Image (spheres, coloured by chain):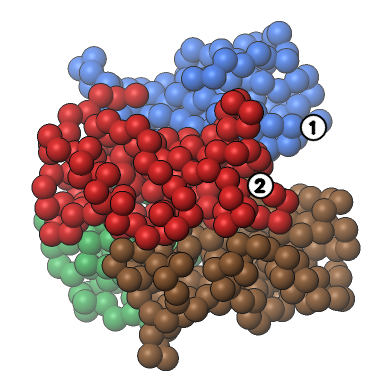
Chain colours: A green, B blue, C red, D brown
């Protein structure tokens, strides 16, 4: 993992404030975990609201938190008055998301003035054991004059 | 659009029965629209449960119904006792999903014995006018012995 | 397919001039076929230079001409003094590219001030019959001050 | 990076023999670098055959060697009598491939009985300094009865 320097020294406050405003994330019970410059973890406990017919986390939910983890990773490198918009992402679902907690770990691969590239690894935790269940590769765009991550 | 022939003459019942069982879809208010062999439409009315901070449909929700439309398009060509699993998808978010109804139209590009390729176009409807807001390209896998679409 | 209007009335000359300058395309024998606003066809006759070990067109070559067809489709909508750069693409290889001619048909899905989204369908022609062998979805960026398509 | 165990103890010979048979790879001057179970490096020195109009490595070439590095990484975990076929890949071109040597490093993220997921990082070397220029995420399929990597 590459080391990055945040341009906004208050990047952690910026991330947690933005995340708290996202209705859907609160609605499904997602929490922001560890953050550092160019890195962000999103955690989601299992509930009926995020499950599919076999009792696993729904694939759309896996995509949603992977996208979000990558978006906040990119956002952590933004300056004041700048936001982040997802241009596109590609998600491989590698194993059933069978467990009690989903964790998406997003990291910046290349930050850019206009476009940034991120990756996310998603694991599912069952009885304390992590299993990789999805990987994502994503393109994001810096937007000026809107301080958040557009979900 | 290529014309396909369903191998299961009851394909429409098969799709609507499977869709009705998907908890997340009912939970967010999604409905199955028109279906034909190799084609499926998923509609989602706007609500607070599916919105982000700017009052648009959330990007994760756009991905979820695009994935679902492609999945059911592929499922429509399956035989009895066969199901569909998403291997991966790639989604371009092209415009804010600002409107009162989201419609994802999934179609099979190439059906396969093992893997199928689908595309989906997502539009948002506002005051009766459709605007394209996302496009998806997806790989799916046929699974034997489980008659549904794994979300 | 959506109808687009070229902002440069000389768009066809602009495309063919740019294509002629691309060393790799000439090197492998690729030709530009039909073009219209938001659309471009690239054709490639079979030769040893573009084959893999089984005597089919190489997958990397399929990706190269698909990327190129999408890039020139986007370029056709650019104004004078503007160029196009591929940000990313996703390619599904659906069938062996077994034939004597490969044709990639790129089209713009959504043109944008900054980013454009394109798709391409690739077919292989054998004894006069076309078979779909790949589909691509792609993001491109407008660049000002460089009139070409960066391969 | 996850540690994998090769099921074929002669995996390195298997990879180098298969690579040597790939006409296109030899044609453009590509070489196989370091290999280990689940990992493969492909190197390509700069030449006119692999350049575009600005004197950089062509984007299609970047995709070709990234796809190949991921394919051979997956192939390294195959048993005797098994081969690998690319199902799809997604490539982000992050910076101009401006340099004298291109290196693609492919690694298996998740090996599977049927499908495997790989990633590749592509760097360009100029005056001894490596710059990241592309990242790829890829799905591959195991094929029985054909011992090679289909390009």
Q: What residue is pinned by disc 2? A: C56
Quadrant assignment, res A130: bottom right
Q: Chain of mark 2?
A: C
What residue is rendered at 12% in x and 34% in y?
C9
Q: Residues within 10 Å of mark 2 (few under 14, many from 20)?
A: many
What residue is rendered at 82% in x and 59% in y?
D147
What residue is rendered at 38% in x and 29% in y?
B122
| In this view, C128 is above or below A61 | above
Measuring from the top left, give residue A69's x and y in whole percent.
Answer: 41, 59
Q: Residues within 10 Å of mark 1 (few under 14, many from 20)?
A: few
Quadrant assignment, res C52: bottom right
Can residue D116 be seen in the rendering of this structure? yes
Measuring from the top left, give residue C113's x and y in whole percent.
Answer: 17, 45
Quadrant assignment, res D47: bottom left
Q: Residue furthest top?
A: B9
| In this view, C85 is above or below C13 | below
């Amino acid at each position: 993992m590459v080391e990055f320097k945040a341009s906004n020294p208050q990047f952690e406050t910026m991330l947690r404030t933005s995340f708290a405003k996202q209705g859907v994330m609160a609605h499904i019970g997602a929490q922001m975990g560890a953050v550092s410059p160019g890195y962000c973890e999103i955690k989601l406990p299992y509930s009926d609201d995020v499950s599919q017919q076999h009792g696993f986390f729904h694939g759309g939910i896996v995509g949603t938190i992977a996208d979000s983890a990558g978006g906040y990773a990119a956002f952590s490198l933004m300056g004041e008055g700048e936001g982040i918009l997802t241009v596109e992402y590609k998600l491989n679902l590698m194993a059933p998301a069978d467990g009690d907690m989903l964790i998406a770990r997003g990291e910046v691969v290349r930050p850019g003035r206009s476009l940034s590239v991120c990756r996310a690894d998603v694991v599912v935790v069952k009885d304390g054991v992590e299993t990789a269940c999805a990987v994502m590769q994503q393109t994001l765009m810096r937007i000026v004059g809107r301080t958040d991550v557009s979900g």
